[in-house]
Image: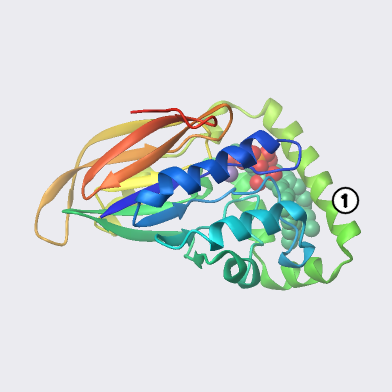
Amino acid sequence: MRRIFIGDLHLQDERPDITEGFIRFIREECLRCDELYILGDLFEAWIGDDERADLSERVAWELQRLRRPGKFFIRGNRDFLIGKDFCALAGLTLLPDISEVRLGRSSAVILHGDLLCTADKKYQKYRRTVSNPFLQKCFLALPLSIRKRIASGMRKKSRSENSVKPLELMEVSDSEVLRIMTARQCSVMIHGHTHRPLIRDYNTEIFQANSLYLPARRYVVGAWDKEFKYVRADGDEVKLITARLDGRYAL
Ligand code: LP5
Ligand code: MN
């Protein structure tokens, strides 16, 4: 069973090269996989399924026509408003913010990654605010033009806050990583969000459902640009692969 995990594509009209690279990727690399997991921030910003922009329509069509693999989506902090309409259009199964998948002998916990940044109290408070269903309902009831302005203001504020925020606040908390992996008996974690792709080994063994103890390992997929990093799992053989938008892949 081959599974592919990608995230942080941040698709937007201003970067058609990334959109074309993504379409090539799903037509080539994903053709040979059994399941595709998109771990959030597929889009740069999402203001509601009803926007029906050319970009999102094209992405949905390309995903929909990808017949073979199961296709799964976890919301990111930019596209947490993606709902069942877009998922139905794209043939995506929407997963909970923290989900699990069996990888051979191991179990993996998969998530976008922003939930792991527990030191950033301001962000976690913001996340709780915008997760409020009533607030989301009010936002989605606004005209699209107003929503676009609000989203652009939020992006501006976020960029300015991030420009002065200490890096350690925008990194994941290892104690939170291990808490979640232990609680869920998952020896593998795969996420994105930080835009700092890496493989991190922990000197902690996690009990697996099949009474195996396996060392904890975390994989971070990389944001898409001329190059990007994604995770490919063949059973429990998990690799962080460097790829390029032009389709030339490197192991
Ligand atoms: O996204 P990024 O990489 O810049 O930084 C993130 C955190 N920031 C965010 C904010 C998003 O960028 C905003 C995207 C808006 C698009 C969708 C609009 C939908 C609106 C729905 C309303 C119900 O996620 C940033 C972290 C960083 O990751 C690293 O982890 O540091 O967090 C912050 O900057 C915290 C700030 O306090 C966020 C301020 C955003 C504006 C707040 C407006 C108040 C809410 C308005 C509700 C209508
Ligand atoms: Mn993110």
**What sort of colour scheme is used for the picture?**
rainbow
Secondary structure type for disc 1: helix
User: Where is 241 relative to 178, above or below?
Assistant: above
Residue 140: x %, y % from top left: 78, 68
Residue 116 visible here: no
Q: How many marks?
A: 1
Residue 120: x %, y % from top left: 57, 41
- Residue type at the position of mark 1: Arg
150 relative position to 9: left or right: right
Residue at x-position 67% and y-position 67%: 132
15 relative position to 38: left or right: right
User: Where is 104 relative to 139, above or below?
Assistant: above
Q: Nearer the viewer, residue 240 or 162?
A: 240
Residue 2 visible here: yes
Q: Nearer the viewer, residue 118 or 43?
A: 43
Q: Nearer the viewer, residue 134 or 108?
A: 108
User: Where is 239 relative to 87, above or below?
Assistant: above
- The answer to which image quadrant residue 141 occupies is bottom right
Residue 65: x %, y % from top left: 53, 61
212 relative position to 166: left or right: left
Q: Nearer the viewer, residue 87 or 27?
A: 27
Residue 204: x %, y % from top left: 20, 40
How busy is the neighbourhood of tag 1: few (under 14 within 10 Å), some, or many (20 plus)?
few
In the picture of the structure, the residue carrying the numbered disc 1 is 149
Indicate yes or no: mark 1 CB to ligand 1 under 8 Å. no
